[in-house]
Image (cartoon, rainbow, N blue to C red):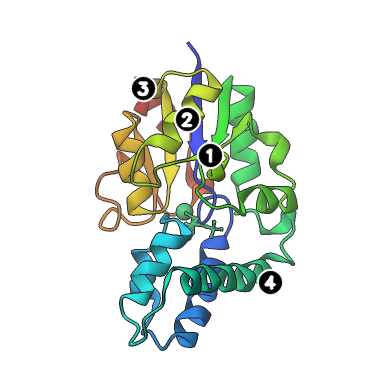
């Protein structure tokens, strides 16, 4: 049977979730909106324009569509600046070993990230060739928690959703995986990711046995 593991990127393969937070924090200050780590939890896994709308809901200022596009571009400039220096050293510990073990065991590997910066991040981490398919965020109509991105990757890998395991650090992402009919591994506390089927503190802690058990 064909089997696959589909990984989110930001906060699962590398700590770019922190850079998204830093970039949003900078933008929030520019629009006088309150923003902190707790509010950021609700933005994890959420696409750029929806995240911006959630931040602007707390700003005392009003912005039209054109101004919003400008603000989203500004956040992206902050983010691109922060990721300029990332290197293969920034891959979370244990992840390269996990990917090779899965490959050797016959798993197909995919990335399901709604970030339009995913391709450049994976290039800088020297991980592009480790994956059989990387979702193109520009072609996804419905962002997480909709299952579309996970279903798109499963289809491209030629693996039935029930034979795929999804790995996510965001509640919206876990919701998307489950809605796609796949078991989910949550990277983070059970309290934050209640819909997951298994939890680890760090992606590198995932064992192949955990994955096999979820696919039985
Ligand atoms: C991922 C991250 C979010 C980010 C989104 C869009 O889902 O978890 O924090 O906002 O991608 O990223 P982008 O690089 O396209 O702005
Ligand atoms: Mg994430």
Does residue 79 lie above or below 204 as drawn? below
Percent across and percent down for residue 173 are 38, 47
The span from disc 1 to disc 2 (Cα, nearest Å) is 10 Å
Percent across and percent down for residue 180 are 34, 31
Does residue 56 lie above or below 215 as drawn? below
Q: Secondary structure at mark 2?
A: helix
- The residue identified by callout 3 is 162
Q: Secondary structure at mark 4?
A: helix
Percent across and percent down for residue 104 are 64, 23
Q: Viewed as shown, does residue 61 lie left or right of 102?
A: left
The span from disc 1 to disc 3 (Cα, nearest Å) is 23 Å
- Say which label, 1 or 2, has the lower sequence index: 1
- Say which label, 4 or 3, has the lower sequence index: 4
- The residue identified by callout 2 is 152
Say which mark, if any, is on residue 81: 4
| Pointer 4 with pointer 2, Cβ within 8 A | no
The span from disc 4 to disc 3 (Cα, nearest Å) is 39 Å
- Between disc 1 and disc 3, the foreground one is 1
- Say which label, 3 or 2, has the lower sequence index: 2
For the view shown, which residue lies furthest in the top direction? Answer: 1
- Say which label, 4 or 2, has the lower sequence index: 4
The span from disc 3 to disc 2 (Cα, nearest Å) is 14 Å
Q: Viewed as shown, does residue 105 lie left or right of 162?
A: right
- The residue identified by callout 1 is 139
């Amino acid at each position: 049977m064909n089997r696959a593991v589909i990984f989110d990127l930001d906060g699962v393969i590398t700590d770019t979730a922190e850079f998204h937070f830093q970039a949003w924090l900078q933008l929030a200050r520019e629009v006088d909106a309150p923003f902190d780590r707790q509010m950021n939890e609700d933005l994890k896994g959420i696409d750029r324009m929806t995240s911006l709308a959630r931040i602007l809901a707390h700003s005392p200022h009003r912005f039209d569509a054109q101004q919003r596009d400008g603000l989203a571009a500004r956040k992206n400039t902050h983010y691109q600046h922060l990721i300029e220096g990332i290197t293969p050293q920034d891959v979370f510990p244990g992840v390269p070993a996990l990917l090779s073990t899965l490959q050797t065991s016959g798993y197909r590997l995919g990335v399901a990230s709604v970030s339009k910066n995913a391709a450049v991040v994976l290039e800088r981490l020297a991980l592009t060739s480790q994956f059989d398919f990387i979702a193109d965020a520009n072609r996804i109509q419905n962002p997480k928690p909709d299952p579309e991105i996970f279903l798109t990757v499963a289809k491209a890998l030629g693996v039935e959703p029930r034979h795929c395991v999804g790995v996510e650090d965001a509640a919206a992402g876990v919701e998307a995986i489950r809605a796609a009919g796949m078991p989910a591994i949550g990277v983070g506390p059970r309290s934050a990711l209640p819909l997951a089927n298994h939890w680890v503190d760090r992606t590198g802690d995932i064992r192949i046995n955990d994955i096999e058990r979820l696919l039985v």
